[in-house]
Amino acid sequence: RAESSSLTCSHDTSKRILVIEDNVDVAATFEQLLRSVGYEVHVAHDGMKGLADAKRLVPDIIFVDIGLPAMDGLAIARDLRSSPLFQKITLVALTGYGQPDDRRRTLEAGFNHHLIKPVPMEELNKLLDLFDAEAVVHHLAVVLELTADREQLLAHHVRRVHELVAAPGVLLGEKVLE
């Protein structure tokens, strides 16, 4: 279950989150933490229901346990990534396994992030900060396509993204920003 006390409230909570986790206590902890700061959270306790809920809800972020009954998290990720509708959602693997081979398998299946349970609260906060930064980058790409003065706008948004992820040690992909 997630450690420490609470999430920070500075995140963009307009995102819809789905948690697919068969451990009822872990799922309830994630749901409670994410709801406490204002996220819309849905929970499924097995892989088949989770996949059906993902297709029905089309959430922005999906936390998926790897070892699920009926359909494991890797199969869920591969299924979702096979659809154009799910190419840009954020998939986060939740697992007790953190060896390099485990991380490689989640990446190959289509996950964006790999969290090892129990998830430290600080790590969850950093990940939510990263979601905010990714949203800014996506918005920037759309705006730049519509704007004539791209260089000035790009410089402004690069500064803004840097501000969002300026906390020491925030992980972006495989690079740590300092």
Image (cartoon, grey):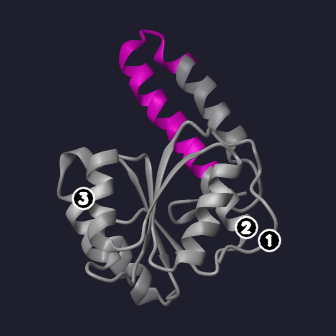
Per the rendering, the mark at residue 82 is none
Drawn side of residue 143 relative to residue 170, left or right: left
Quarter of the figure with residue 7: bottom right
Quarter of the figure with residue 39: top right
Q: Mark 3 points at which residue?
A: 81
Q: Give the range drawn in magenta.
A: 129-152
| Mark 2 residue type | Met
Q: Which residue is rendered at x = 37% and y = 14% of the image?
A: 146
Percent from the top left, x then y, of residue 37? 70, 46
| Mark 3 residue type | Arg
Percent from the top left, x then y, of residue 78? 23, 67
Of labels 1 and 2, earlier in sequence is 1
Label 1: few (<14), some (14–19) or many (≥20) C-alpha neighbours in 10 Å: few
Per the rendering, the mark at residue 121 is 2
| Mark 1 residue type | Ser
Label 3: few (<14), some (14–19) or many (≥20) C-alpha neighbours in 10 Å: some
Q: Which residue is rendered at x = 33% and y = 46% of the image?
A: 58
Confirm or deny contact between disc 3 and disc 1 (CB under 8 A): no
Q: Does the magenta stretch include residue 9?
A: no
Vertical order, 145 against 73 (above or below): above
Percent from the top left, x then y, of residue 55? 26, 51
Quarter of the figure with residue 125: bottom right
Image quadrant for the C terminus? bottom right
Given residues 166 and 1, the one toward you in this image is 1
Drawn side of residue 107 relative to residue 1, left or right: left
Vertical order, 73 against 164 (above or below): below
Q: Mark 1 points at which residue?
A: 4
* Disc 3 versus disc 1: nearer the observer: 1
Q: Which residue is rendered at x = 59% and y = 60% of the image?
A: 31
Confirm or deny contact between disc 1 and disc 2 (CB under 8 A): yes
